[in-house]
Image (tube, helix red, strand yellow):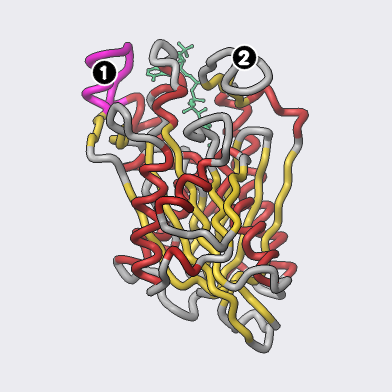
Amino acid sequence: MRRSVVAGCGAYLPERVVTNDELATRIDTSDEWISQRTGIRQRHIAADGELTSDLALAAARQALANAGIEGADLDIIVLATATPDNTFPATATKVQADLGNKAGAAFDVQAVCTGFIYALAMADNMLRLGQASTALVIGAEVFSRILDWDDRSTCVLFGDGAGAVVLKAGEGAGTNRDRGVLSTHLHSDGANYKALYVDGGPGSTGTAGFIRMAGREVYKQAVVRMAECVEHALDANGLEHGDVDWLVPHQANLRIIESTGRKLDIPMERVIVTVDRQANTSAATIPLALAEATADKRVREGQLVALTAMGGGFTWGSALIRW
Ligand code: UT7
């Protein structure tokens, strides 16, 4: 059976770090409120003129180097972002050009904080079907550009960054012990469109916009949905909670992460956490966490890694990977 095997990961975080204390000098908030409610201590913010494509390219180059693959040899480039450089063309095509790739197909996927799992699912399905043999999957965002700095209930929560993963098609027996993406599960419910959205933006409204969020509602749904779709993934593969070596959840709030871990009976020692240092980078949180945990050798070949995310739409989803 053909599967998508992870060949390398990469990450990029803008140089500038903004601590909670620095934010508290500009808006009516405190380090105590932010860290107690969310676990966030700092975030990285892109420099003036630094675009989503710049962040994506830096993460992509690192992932390709770790995978030992040239950009020119990629069959597909899938970029998850809610903050593209321009309305069109896809930011992925900019990355494609900068990587010197001419033979492949590059496109963006928009599922906000679940974007990386959606992009991974697109790439995985194309690899399984034989439409591609190598794929670059990126999550990249500059959420700092769509924050309303007068809204303290949202602007303290987000940061900028990018992560990338290279996938290569591999052949195996197709059991849950064989390497590769075992499954992806995607969901959305547009009835919650206005619980987390940007009130404008490039496209049909013709206005610029900022993030608006019903924080409590998002919180309540996140703790249910993120655990639920990992359960579905484990059931679909004949696996149990105890089989998961690493849970890599979307990083929005430490309390949501802890609660997801509790529901799944996975102790925090087996959960990758970056939200304290990076805040919520939307589609980039999961590949950033994977890049960190593979670089420091926590995540190793043969282990079972469960990804889960929930975000605007609402969208939510999971992926199980035998690393
Ligand atoms: O990727 C998915 C996207 N987002 C999320 O997953 C976020 C999900 N939601 C959350 O993480 C939480 O709901 C928040 C962190 C956004 C808020 O935490 P909460 O415990 O639900 O607080 P709250 O919204 O109920 O606000 C409590 C109080 C309010 O004051 P009053 O009305 O009780 O006097 C807010 O005005 O906290 C106040 N507040 C702040 N105070 C200081 C809100 N933001 C701040 C702030 N600093 N930055």
Q: Nearer the viewer, mark 2 or mark 1?
A: 2
Residue type, label 1: Ala
Q: Residues within 10 Å of mark 2 (few under 14, many from 20)?
A: few
x and y percent of residue 78 in the render?
57, 53
Between 16 and 225, which is closer to the camera in this rendering?
Answer: 16
Q: Quadrant of residue 280?
A: top left
Q: Residue at x 39, y 15 (%)?
A: 149
Q: Residue at x 25, y 30 (%)?
A: 18
Q: Residue at x 38, y 35 (%)?
A: 51
x and y percent of residue 123 in the render?
62, 61
**Which residue of the protein is positioned furthest toward the bottom in this rendering?**
173
Q: Is residue 91 left or right of residue 48?
A: right
Residue 249 on the magenta segment:
no
Question: Residue tagged by mark 1?
Answer: 24
Residue 206: give its label: 2
Between 151 and 240, which is closer to the camera in this rendering?
Answer: 151
**Range shown magenta:** 20-32
Q: Residue at x 46, y 73 (%)?
A: 7
User: Can the viewer see residue 243?
Assistant: no
Per the model, the C-alpha gap separating discs 2 and 1 is 33 Å
Eyeballing the image, is 199 above or below 227? Answer: above
Residue 47: give its label: none
